[in-house]
């Protein structure tokens, strides 16, 4: 992973607010500028998600697009400066209550941002990378205002966690009417290409069962990349971000 911030986003561009249940990092206009579309991006640590390539590729592409809106990020549970992401995901399995608390705090933050007229409640998108996708899916199941989900190499099956709380396959009734875009390698053995396919298919079947004959559930599968086929190459980040520009913002600026 490169340790040089992309010139499109610098440390001076990243704002911080501690007026909410969780520390909130974001790029875009100040919170006092009024309601705007919001993209919440879940990757690893918040500042890495916005500053460090390749994790920040979605944020960089969205900033370059010129569309009005803010991109928010949080430190995922047990992530942050000088903390090991590999150890963090192991703790998720041992301490699922911390993940549940995090989801509740993010949801409360979104509610407060909406009530404070900082974000537009009709324009909320979640984006995730790997483990951040699981957070995005579980959060969307709780918050009906979330309309779009962009999921790169999504972790969907979470071994060791309480199934009733962390199994997205049991939340299809709360999710089928959103717009999804899944992007994954054709042999991702870390999170399972087949798991991603199966979840997208079951979402589509649930949408059909509920009367949506042409559900907006998109899936892109390309050559696997990186360790265990779990990497996300730049072209895939661009593909996903272009989908957000078209589907969420309504086209090029």
Image: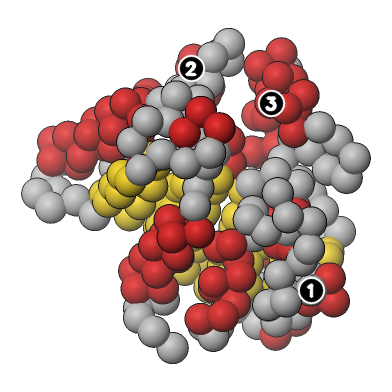
Residue at the image position 43 percent from the left and 31 percent from the top: 188
Q: Is residue 53 above or below residue 202?
A: below
Badge 2: few (under 14), some or many (20 or more) residues near its Cα, within 10 Å?
few
Q: Residue at x 58, y 41 (%)?
A: 132
Q: Which residue is at the far right?
A: 82
Q: Nearer the viewer, mark 2 or mark 3?
A: 3
Q: Nearer the viewer, residue 159 or 7?
A: 7
Marks 1/3: CA distance? 28 Å
Report the disc number at residue 152. none
SS at circle 3: helix
N-terminal of the pair, mark 1 or mark 2, is: 1
- The percent position of residue 1, horizontal first and vertical second, equals 70, 49
Which residue corresponds to mark 2? 164
Mark 1 vs mark 3: give the one in front.
1
Q: Is residue 107 left or right of residue 229?
A: right
In what quadrant of the picture does the C terminus appear? Answer: bottom left
Identify the residue at the far bottom of this view: 253
**Looking at the image, is 226 positioned above or below residue 56?**
above
Few, some or many residues within 10 Å of mark 1 (<14, 14–19, 20+): some
Q: Position of residue 169 (x, y in %)?
A: 36, 25
Picture coordinates of residue 119, whole percent (x, y): 60, 70
Residue 192 is at least partly visible in this image:
yes
Q: Which residue is mark 1?
A: 10
- Residue 95 appears in which quarter of the rendering? top right
Q: Secondary structure at mark 2?
A: helix
**Which residue is the site of mark 3?**
89
* Residue 72 left/right relative to 228: right
- Residue appearing at x 48%, y 17% in the figure: 164
The residue depicted at 86 percent of the width and 59 percent of the height is 18
What kind of element bears circle 1?
A: loop
Residue 213 image point, x, y percent: 9, 49
On screen, residue 248 versus residue 65, left or right, reads left
């Amino acid at each position: 992973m490169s340790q040089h911030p992309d010139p499109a986003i610098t440390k001076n561009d990243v704002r911080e607010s501690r007026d909410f249940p969780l520390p909130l990092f974001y790029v875009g206009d100040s919170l006092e500028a009024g309601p705007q579309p919001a993209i919440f991006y879940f990757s690893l640590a918040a500042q890495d998600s916005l500053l460090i390539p390749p994790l920040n590729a979605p944020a960089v592409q969205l900033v370059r697009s010129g569309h009005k809106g803010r991109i928010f990020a949080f430190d995922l549970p047990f992530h942050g400066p000088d903390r090991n992401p590999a150890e963090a995901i192991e703790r998720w399995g041992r301490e699922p209550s911390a993940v549940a608390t995090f989801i509740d705090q993010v949801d409360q933050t979104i509610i407060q941002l909406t009530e404070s007229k900082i974000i537009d409640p009709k324009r909320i998108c979640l984006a995730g990378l790997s483990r951040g996708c699981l957070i995005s899916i579980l959060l969307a199941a709780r918050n009906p205002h979330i309309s779009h989900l962009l999921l790169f190499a999504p972790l969907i099956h979470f071994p060791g966690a309480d199934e009733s709380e962390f199994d997205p396959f049991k939340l299809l009734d709360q999710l089928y009417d959103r717009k999804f875009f899944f992007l994954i390698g054709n042999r991702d053995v870390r999170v399972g290409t087949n798991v991603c396919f199966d979840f997208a298919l079951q979402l589509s079947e649930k949408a059909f069962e509920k009367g949506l004959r042409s559900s907006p559930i998109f899936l892109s599968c390309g050559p696997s990349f990186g360790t265990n086929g779990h990497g996300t190459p730049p072209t895939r980040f661009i593909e996903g971000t272009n989908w957000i520009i078209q589907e969420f913002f309504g086209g090029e600026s």
